[in-house]
Structures are given as C-alpha cells and as structure tokens.
Image (cartoon, rainbow, N blue to C red):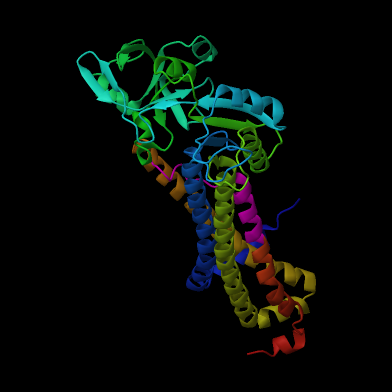
Amino acid sequence: MIIDTDKWREILFTLGQHKLRTGLTAFGVFWGIFMLTVLLGAGKGLENGVKGGFHSVPNMIWMWSGGATQIPYQGMPTGRIITLKQEDIDALMTSVAGVGLVKGQNSVGMWGGSAPVIVYGTESGAFPVQGSHEGFAGVHSIDIAQGRYLNELDTGQRRKVAVIGERVREVLFAPGENPIGADVQINGISFLVIGVFKSRMGSNDPGEQEKVYIPNETLRQAFNQQGWIGSFIIQPSPGVSAAKIESDIINFMYERHKVSPKDIGVLRSYNLQREFEKIEGLFFAIKAFSWVVAVGTILAGAIGVGNIMLIVVKERTREIGVRKALGATPSSIVTMIVQESILITAVAGYAGLVVGVFLLEGIASVLEAAGGDTGMFKSPEIDFANALIAVGVLIFSGFLASLLPAAKAASVNPILALQDE
C-alpha cells in the first residue's frame, strides 16, 4: 500500500493555515474522549472499591431465628422461639432441592452480647469471637495478612486455633512482634494464633478488624453452645437461584417447626445475591450514564468538526474548482475532505484517551502510595475493550462529520467555482 505523502502534506498545510480554528475544533473532540475515559475509569474505581469489600461468594443466604410466634398453628401455642439446631442442617441438605451447602455459625460477644476478654501476656482486650469454617475467608469478606485461615483439620478436630483481626494484633502484641504461634487466652481458654486477617472494607469496617475467628464446633463446645446454632450460612447448588431457594428454605423450616405461613418474622434471612444484583444494576446505570454524557460530548465535537469543514469547503471553493477542472474526480475530493476530518478527530481523540488514561494511572498511584486503604474507591481504570469502543466511536464520528462537507465539495461546479471571488 503506497501512502500519498504529498496529499497528507497538503492536508497538514491546510490545517496549519488556521491553527486557532483547528485547535478549538479538535479540543471539542479531545474533551469528549477525555470525559468518557475519566467517567468510565471513575465508575470502575467505585465498582472496584465496593465489590472489593463484597463477599467473594455473592449467592449466599443467611438465616437466623427471629421473633416469637404470634399465630397458633397445628396445636402449637404462640410465643415460641424457633431454635436452630444441627438436625435442621441435616434436614435442609436432604430435603430441599438446590441446597448445595449449609454451615452453622455461632458467636460470643456479638449482637449485643458481652465480648469475651482476650489476654496475651500483660495485654488484654474485649473482642467478639465468631465461629467459622474452612474456606470461609471470602464469605466473611476478609483477606489473610499473615499466617493462614482455618482448614479442614482445624474444624474437623475441633482444634483450639484462632485467626485474629489486625486491630486485635495491635492491642495484644508489641509492634513488630510475630503473633503466629502465640497462645492467647479467650475467657481463660488457651487458643493458638494461626493467622491475622484484614477486612476488605479497610477503615470503612473497623468492627471487622476487631473480630476473632475460631472453628465453629470448637466455639460451641468451649462456650457451652452445643444445644443450638446461631445462624445458618446457605449456598445454593451451581446454577440455582438464591432468590428462589430462599423461599423454599423458609417454607420448609416453617413446616418443619410447625409455624404458620402467615407468621412473618419468626425466621429471618438475608439474601446476598439480591443485594449483589442491586449493586450490579447500579454500576450498569453508572456506565450507561457515562457513555450517554461522553458520547453526547463527542457528537457535539463532531458537529463542530462538520461545521468547520463546511467553512473550509466554502473558503476553498475556487481551489476545488481548479482541481476538478484539472481532472480531479469527485471521489478524490470526497477523500480529501474525509481525511482532513478524520485526522482532526483521530489525533484529538487519541490525545484525550491518552491524557485520560494517564490521569487515571496517576490517581491509582496516589491511592496505592496512601497505603491501599481507599475504602469505597480503588484502582480506577478503563477496560481495554472500552478503550477500543471509544476509538471506534471517535473514528465513526469523524467520518459522519465529514459527509455533508464532502458532499458539498464533490458537487462544486468547476465553472462557477472559478468565477468565485
């Protein structure tokens, strides 16, 4: 493919004749792409921050005992509190289709109770203790900063091991002291520290940093909770909607414990998938809004380019007439105008994209240098696919902007053009 350097030299010369006009026209396109890049990057940063603190398993269901029964049912009196037990877990696993996992969760010092005193050496503090299971770090929305999380042997053998929050480590241990392998006393019972965790929400969730996680069966045995389970954590089988299975589980538990279907609030539940879908919808709306605003700005810039090209065609009517008189074809005239328009939009748009990306990278670097605890905003970025789409929109808008001026240039009558003053 041979590049016509003379034609491109001529296009650059023509644009250079009116530097201010060309610059102002290009700025409209530059600003549109820049705004698109920044808006999409900021939206992605907000999404990263919110989803980063979200549970890594977004289709979990929590269920716990609520208020007392208010309606007599099947010979059972009112005023009953439904106590969750291990037998309920076994029944859910075998009787409700679509249930993939059910785990019990107990705690000490949460939901209004007195937190147990945790002692290490001469230091002590009152921190809530929560039962957990192997592989549940993501469920609790925490990351291991040091050591490890609970494993199958810990839970299966009811080991007295603990994973402590960063705030607990700060209170009980000296700066720089390694807590892994240390024995801490929880209400007089010795536990081996195997890990330190931090909340994915950072400073936005300070209470999580003050927790201690131990195997749930160990907690039930050590703190005399073997007769009941505080709450159930339920995960549907792959492909099963958490919204559908939630109602199936509640209906089964109501029937199992002889509770009237009209007795609302006896068992309560929280569907994480429903909340996750709300968040997904919110960020889809943010992306759509960003595209609408930015594409509108790009089109405004393209219209500006089209208007300028109309002026250019008007100013160069005599020149175009001479070209056609010397044998230039309408297609060559159209190509010249289209190339000028696309050059303006391509260069200005690419500059806007580059500046926008550099701005996002700069913000990301500043946030990272601040320690990474950015709460609801983290790692602003623009997807490569979105960048390609933006470039495509840019080139197409430049092409559209040139159609009317190119058509006018191609229709110039050489005889009338040569008479033009």
In the image, farthest residue toward the front: 75
Residue 165 position within the rendered picture, expressed as x and y whole percent measured from the top left: 36, 26
Q: Visible in this render: residue 322?
A: no
Q: Quadrant of the C terminus?
A: bottom right
Q: Residue at x 76, y 69 (%)?
A: 332
Q: Looking at the picture, does residue 86 appear above or below residue 337?
A: above
Q: Looking at the picture, does residue 348 appear above or below residue 379?
A: below
Q: Which stretch appears magenta?
A: 374-395
Q: Is residue 394 magenta?
A: yes
Picture quadrant of residue 167: top left
Q: Residue at x 71, y 54 (%)?
A: 3
Q: Nearer the viewer, residue 387 or 268?
A: 268
Q: Residue at x 53, y 34 (%)?
A: 82
Residue 220 position within the rendered picture, expressed as x and y whole percent measured from the top left: 45, 19
Residue 192 position within the rendered picture, expressed as x and y whole percent measured from the top left: 37, 11
Picture quadrant of residue 253: top right
Q: Residue at x 19, y 15 (%)?
A: 122
Number of marks present in the image shown: 0
Apparent side of residue 60 relative to residue 4 in the rendered image (left or right): left
Residue 297 position within the rendered picture, expressed as x and y whole percent measured from the top left: 55, 67
Q: Is residue 333 magenta?
A: no
Q: Looking at the picture, does residue 14 appear above or below residue 161?
A: below
